[in-house]
Structure formats: C-alpha cells, structure tokens
Amino acid sequence: MAPKKKAGLQTVQKETDELERKVNALVQYFNTLGVSERAETSQRCSELQSTVTAILTTLQKLTKADEWAPVGDYDQRKRQEEERLRTLQTKLRALTVQPQDNSAEDEDDSEDEDSQEEHADFAQDDDDDDDDDEGDDRKSAQKSDVCYVVLSSFRGQEEGDLIVKKGAVVKILEKSDDGWWFAQDKEGNKGLVPKTYLKKMSPNERVAEIKNDDDEDEEDGDDDEDEVQEGESDPADRKPSTASNWDTVRQAVSEIDATDVLSAMGAIPPGFRPSTLSKLLEEGTSYRASHYIQPRLSQSELSFKDLQLDPDTGKVLARPARVCVNVILWSCRMIPPPGVGLRVLSRHVRLCAFNGTEVLSNVHTVRASYTPSSPKTWSFSPRVSSMLPSLLDGDCFFRCDSHSPDLGILFELGVTYIRNSTGERGDLSCGWAFLKLFDENGALIPLRTQELIVHGGTPYEGVVDTFHTSTKKGGSTGVLHQILMTRKLPKLIIRLRSPNTRTREQLSLLPDTLLGCMSTVPLLVLYRQLLADTLLLDRVTMQNADLICSSVLATFPKVLDQSDLMDAFRKSWVEQENNLKRSDKKDVAVLKKLFESVYMSSVFPLLFSAEMPDPLWANEDTEAQRARLIYSPTQKISLETMLSSNHKHQAFSIGQISYDLLTSAWN
C-alpha cells in the first residue's frame, strides 16, 4: 500500500477553524468570570497556545508538493492562514496577561488608590527594568514595565489592539517575540501595539514629559515631582542633561501627522502613508541622478573608480554591472484613489535600487496618466504626436553593481495632493511593491512581465495590506473564488527586458549604479566622455585639483534633475543630429563638439535666466510658465537674446562656468 500523504493546506484550514471556535468560546467564558476566577483559565490558555504553535509549525513546513490536488494562489492562502494563527496567539496572550493585571488592581479597595498605584508604576519603570536580577514576588519580575513613546499613530486592526496616537506615552506590560507588545496608556486602557511604532524613553525624556504634564494639570504635577526626583536619582542616569536635544525630539514626535488628520476625515484609505522616497528627494542631491552621474573616487582618492579610458580607442572604458536591465512600467490596477476634500496634482511611481534596509541608487520618477471614468487604473507612456516627455516615459534603465543578495527594485506609488479647504500640499504613498532580482541560488530572475502586488504602509513597516480585499473568515475558499479575489488586489504591472547589443554597450559606459529614462542614454554617454577627456587627458597631472573651466561639465547635472530642460536639450539634439552625415554620426569627436554647441545654445541660457522660475514639483502654474519660456518662439532665449539689454540674468557665480572636481567626485 502506498504511504499516506501528510496533511495539506485544507487540513490545516479545518484545524484552524476548529481552534478559532475554541478560542472565541474561551474569550466569551473568560469575560463572564470574576477577577479571582480568571486565573483558573491559564492552564486552558496554555494548552491552546501549544496547539496554535504546533499547527503554525506544520503550516510553515507545508509546500505545494504536499497537496492532494492543485490549489489556486497557494502562497496567498498559506499566508492568510498564518495571519489567522498569529491572531489567535495574540488573543490567548492577552488572556494570559489580563488576570495578573486585574489581581494587582484588586489589592486596593479604593479606586483612587488604584490610579495612584498605576501612576507610580510609570515613575518606577526603569528601576524595575534594571533590577530584574533581584527577582522576587514583585510585579516587575513578571513584566517589562517600561515606558515608550509612540512614533506613529496606531488605529488598531483586530480585537484586543490598543488605539494610540503619535506622541503618546505608554507602559509596556509584556514583550513577545512576534513583535506585538502588551501596553497600557495613561488612561488605563490596555491592548497590543506593534513594537515598530514605539521608541524607548530615556530618563531625561521622561523628566521632560513630566514637566510638560505639570504645566497642563496642577494636580497631576504633584505626583510628577516625585517622578522627577526619582529620575534624577536613578543610577542609570549617568549622562549630562540633554534638554535642548529632547526639545527637538519631542517637537518631532508630538507633531500631528497630516495623514492622521486626513485619515480621520476619511480622505485617504488606511494604507496610505507619507511618501518615503519623496522625503529622500527633498533632502538634497544625494538621491538624485545629478549625484550618481558624477565619477567616483577610488579608495585611495588618487584615481577614479568607475571612469577610465580605453587606451586603444580613447573612449570611456566599458564597465559591466551586476544588474543591467530594461524596466518598462506598464500599468497600475485597482489603486484606491483619495477621497473628497483632496485634489490630486500628480500620480506617479518612484523607483530605486533597494536591499530591504536602504536605498542604493538615485530615485527615478515616472508620472502616470489616468481617465476620470477609471480612476483606479494608471497607465504610462501615453501616445503623443511629438517627442514623449521623459517624465511620462515608462521605459527606464536599471543599472546597479551592489552585491547584496536581497538586491531588488523598490516601486512606490504616490500622489501629490492639495487640500481644497486649506491649500496645504503634500505627498502620499498609495502603496509599494518590491521585486527581488535574484533567487535563492544567486541567479538573476527571468526577464519577463511581472505582476507585483501593491502593499499598504511603507517598506520599513513590513506588509500592511489594510486596503486590500482579502478573504473573509468563514467565507468561500474555492479556487474560482480565490481567482476573483486576486483580481481585486492592487497590482503594478511591469516588464523586464534585456537591452539589445547597442543599448547594452551604451549603458556599460555609464556609472556602475544609475537609474533613468532610456531616451536620455545617448546624452549621458556623451557627458561621461567629456568628463573622461577633461579629467583624465586634459589635466596637467592626476594630483591637480584646480577648478576646471567648463560650463557644460559644471551645469549639465543641474539640467539632468530638471526634466523639462532635459527634454528641451534632447529635442534640440535630435534636430541637429539628424542633419549630420552618416559618417559624422559615428565620429565621437564630431558628436562631442555638437553636444557642447547644442547645450550652450539651448538650455544653458535658460538655466540662468532671471525670468525662468525655479522648478516646483506638480505645480501647474510654474510648469506652464517654464514651458512658455522653453518652447514659445516669441520668448525663446538664446545666446543672441542674452546679449540684449531687455534680458535679465541671474547674478553671476563662478559655479556657472567652473567644474569643481573635489566637490563633484564622491567615494
């Protein structure tokens, strides 16, 4: 007789359903008991916890090969069962902790004494945490009992969760390995909070918190004075006072998050967050293409790491990167739109190299288009009669030389909005998706069309699928039902492609790590060639670091960060290149001269014109005004019009014509 096949996913689902009924029955029974009688249920809780752990272990070991018949969307159904078991663990853990808290509260007959005891626990949290070795019958020996600051508002998703606001202070009663900690706020409410939302308070921070409470409530301030004295005499407080630093931290923590206000108004879905990648772009040029297009110095800082010349041809030496692929943004489906009260100025996708913990490249942005009749569907690369603007072009290149095993592409779907009532602008993340580029064996994944599920929250929170349509408990779990539910999930559709031979040769001349639009590659290659000629051939010695007189080298990175100027340069370049002979198009010397000539006669005058407003992201008025100056024949700025007395220039700066090697090159 053939050996009996072990239980599959459906068997685990049945066991989980039965276990869920038992846990819910125990919770109802627990609520009907008195405080003294609740301790008797601890043994039953322990038994159910052991059962949950056993089923969870069995589930984690299951694979598709263990199934008796094919199961549709196996990974998602397995993940849903794991979430159900985790929820049961959380409920049982809450029952285990609650009797201890209630019994401690019953030791006093007066409600006033109970509140004073709880308030005193807040003052003693660090002493209890530091004196774990003195373990006696005190409550601190059974619980962590430490105060934490809430970094981000948590609204609660399941029964037993504690709703907390950003900046609030909570006391941690129990810590668990699954990341959900049992906490109590100052009003006495108890529940579970994710540990990633919390930050431990130092003694100095607690002193500042108490002083703030003293200003708000005089009666509570009397109790807080005792806490201040305890904090000052705490032997763990060895460092000098950092009140000024804490003021800065406190201001950042207690600041009301705009997303909290919008979420309370019902203007955004729960999965929306402040944009992570937009904040990186606002911090300067560290995550912009202008930073990554510059050459990198070697470890000795006496030569360039990624910029060398081929001695035979005199061209930039090709450098193969670990990953060099063509990424085409195709569409986004079932993306929840913002609600009433917000006017969307831009829908876009930002992408970058990511290894799960840090951004490894520049952040590239592609704007999406949509139709009002289908607001949940985004599309890219619309068909236009003229040259497609690079901001709308979803045809991108991805080049990265990181050797991280978790290297992949992070996609953040975002919207830029303005509140109709206040005129406030902001950037929100509608969700994110991550595509890991290498499998467990270190091989590059197949280059094909990918449908990526869009998750709520941020990449640093983990998977927060709060606006996803998921299977309801007790509902149908058939294959057809799963297929229908999968179609309702927010998805990003992209296509990975291997560049052709000519494009691959051009990309190999670019920096080891860079993202950008495919249409700009020829211009980037010529800029790198000019850099190599100037830095490796024209310098007197390799140790010379004087300023280099070159307006093209000095200002082209600024143009690269302004997509409308880059489009104007590309348009002028294509027009001039089409007039060249076939032999001249292959001559690097001719192309370099044409590059400098077209650049200086087209975008360089615009870059330093006093009439040209500074670029503002998703500002319609500014974009329209810049477009009039760039493309209007009557207002077009050239070298001739710049010499006219009617033209206004920006104040001259040496940086307009000089390339600083020391500040441009980076390690």
Image (tube, rainbow, N blue to C red):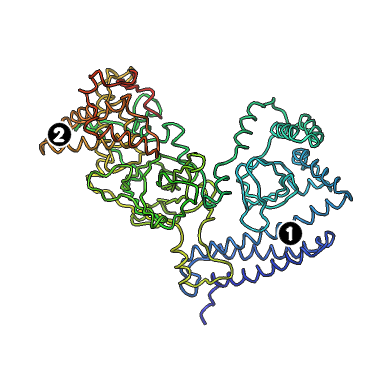
Residue that carries the numbered disc 1 in the rendered image: 95
Q: Amino acid at mark 2?
A: Asp
On screen, residue 261 versus residue 638, left or right, reads: right
Query: Which residue is at a point 27% across and 37% down the rendered structure image?
Result: 567
Q: Name above or below for residue 389 compared with residue 497.
A: above
Q: Name above or below for residue 597 compared with residue 340.
A: above
Residue that carries the numbered disc 2 in the rendered image: 587
Query: Which residue is at a point 12% across and 36% down the rendered structure image?
Result: 579
CB under 8 Å between discs 2 and 1? no
Quote the CA–CA distance across marks 2 and 1: 78 Å
- The extreme front residue here reads 421
Q: Is there any visible trace of residue 545 in the rendered image?
A: no
- The extreme right residue here reads 109
- The extreme bottom residue here reads 1
Q: Which structural element holds mark 2?
A: loop
Query: Which residue is at a point 66% across and 60% down the rendered structure image?
Result: 89
Q: Position of residue 530 (x, y in %)?
A: 25, 28
Q: Which structural element holds mark 1?
A: helix
Mark 1 closeness class: few <14, some 14–19, many ≥20 residues within 10 Å: many
Query: Which residue is at a point 67% across and 42% down the rendered structure image?
Result: 168
Q: Quadrant of residue 584?
A: top left
Say which of 125 and 601 sits in front.
601
